[in-house]
Amino acid sequence: MKTRRLGKSAIYVSDICMGTMTFGSQTDEKEAMRILDECYDAGINFYDAAENYPVPPDPKWAGRTEEIVGKWMKTKDRDSLIIATKVSGPSHGWIKSSQRAGMTAMDRHNITRAVEASLERLDTDYIDLYQTHWPDHGTGFDETMETLDELVRAGLIRIIGCSNENAWGLMKSLATAERLGTARYQTIQNNFSLNNRRFED
C-alpha cells in the first residue's frame, strides 16, 4: 500500500482511506469489524468517521460509528492507526445534526464539546485528524481557528482539516491561520470531480 503525506504535516497515511459513515445503521457492528480488519490487513491505516455518523443522521444512533471504530481500535496498536473524525457544522438543510441539541456553530463551546464527546466515544486520548464538517461562515474565522489551535496545543488533536468547504471559506480559514499564527487546515474532504464542481462556487 502506497502512503501519502497529509498536507505539510508529519503524518503519512495509506493511499486509501476507509470511510465508516454507515457503521451502526446499514452496516451492523459485526460486519463493520470484519470490514475494518480486512482493510487493516490490506495495509490501510487511515479511517474516517464523524460525530453525526452513521447516516442517515438520527438521534437514536448518532455517534454509534465512533463507538464501533473505538471498540475496533482496542484490537490494534493505536500508533499504527490514523483516525479522523469531524465536528458537525450547518449543512444548509441537507443534514440535521442530532449532536449537542442540533447546535452546529463552529464556535469554542461547540467545538470543544464535540472533541470531548468524540474522544470518549472513540475511547482514545487523541484524534489524529479533526475536521470541520460543513462550513459555518457565521461564526468568526478567528474563533474557529483559535479554538482548533488550542486543541492541537493541548494534545487532543494532532492536525486539522475541513470537509465540504468552498474555495472562499478555505481561503479565509488559511489566511486567518496565517495571520494569527495558529494551526492551519492540512486537508480538505470534498465531493469534487470533473462532474461535480460545486465547491468552486
Image: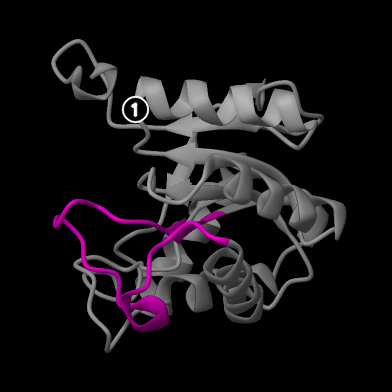
Q: Is residue 46 above or below residue 89?
A: above
Q: For the point 14% across and 57% down, which residue is it?
A: 93
Q: Which residues are magenta?
A: 85-107
Residue 54 image position (x, y, % from top left) = 31, 68
Q: Is residue 94 magenta?
A: yes
Q: Which of these two is toward me, 2 or 150?
A: 150
From the image, give the main secondary structure of the stretch colored magenta: loop
Which quadrant would the N terminus be assigned to in this image?
Answer: top right
Q: Which of these two is toward me, 89 or 119?
A: 89
Q: Amino acid at mark 1?
A: Asn
Residue 91 image position (x, y, % from top left) = 25, 52
* Residue 82 visible in the picture: no
Q: Is residue 126 above or below residue 38?
A: below
Q: Which of these two is toward me, 121 or 172?
A: 172
Which quadrant would the C terminus be assigned to in this image?
Answer: top left
Q: Is residue 26 left or right of residue 79?
A: left
Residue 184 image position (x, y, % from top left) = 68, 32
Near mark 1 (Cα within 10 A), the count class, few <14, some 14-19 or many ≥20, is some
Tell me the colour scheme of the image: one colour
Q: Secondary structure at mark 1?
A: loop
- Would you name the residue on which mark 1 appears? 166
Q: Is residue 80 left or right of residue 44?
A: right
Q: Is residue 21 left or right of residue 131?
A: left
The outermost residue toward the bottom is 60
Q: Is residue 77 magenta?
A: no
